[in-house]
Image (tube, grey):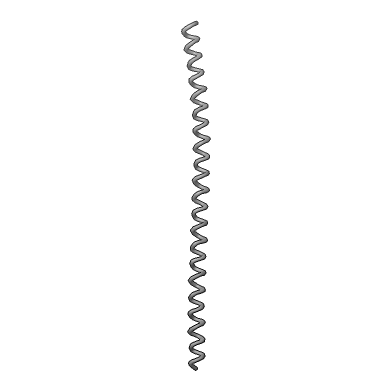
């Protein structure tokens, strides 16, 4: 009976140890996934902001050019 109870206790301790390792592994995997998603979102937002910045600069340059030539036409016209 003692041998059997000791075996059960040893198996129980081993199962607890495996369960803890499994939970830690799952937690680490979830943290890595979350970090990767956050980095991907940040990169995507950065790309969108860069495109908006470039478009704004091009639009500003076009408007300034049009206004400059109209002003020149009015002054010389």
**Which residue sits at x=52%, y=69%?**
22
Asked whether 2 or 40 is in front, the reply is 2
Asked whether 68 or 29 is in front, the reply is 29
Classify 31 as above or below 69.
below
Classify 49 as above or below 24.
above
Asked whether 34 or 17 is in front, the reply is 17
Q: How many marks?
A: 0
Q: Position of residue 77 (x, y in %)?
A: 50, 5
Q: Position of residue 57 (x, y in %)?
A: 50, 28
Q: Going by the picture, which residue comes out furthest to the bottom?
A: 1
**Which residue sits at x=53%, y=48%?**
40
Q: Position of residue 43 (x, y in %)?
A: 52, 44
Classify 54 as above or below 64.
below
**Which residue sits at x=49%, y=21%?**
63
Q: Position of residue 44 (x, y in %)?
A: 52, 43
**Which residue sits at x=49%, y=55%?**
34
């Amino acid at each position: 009976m003692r041998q059997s109870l000791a075996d059960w206790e040893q198996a129980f301790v081993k199962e607890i140890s495996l369960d803890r390792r499994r939970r830690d592994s799952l937690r680490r995997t979830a943290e890595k996934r979350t970090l990767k998603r956050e980095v991907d979102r940040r990169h995507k937002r950065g790309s969108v902001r860069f495109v908006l910045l470039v478009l704004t600069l091009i639009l500003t340059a076009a408007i300034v050019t049009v206004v400059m030539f109209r002003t020149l036409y009015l002054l010389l016209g």
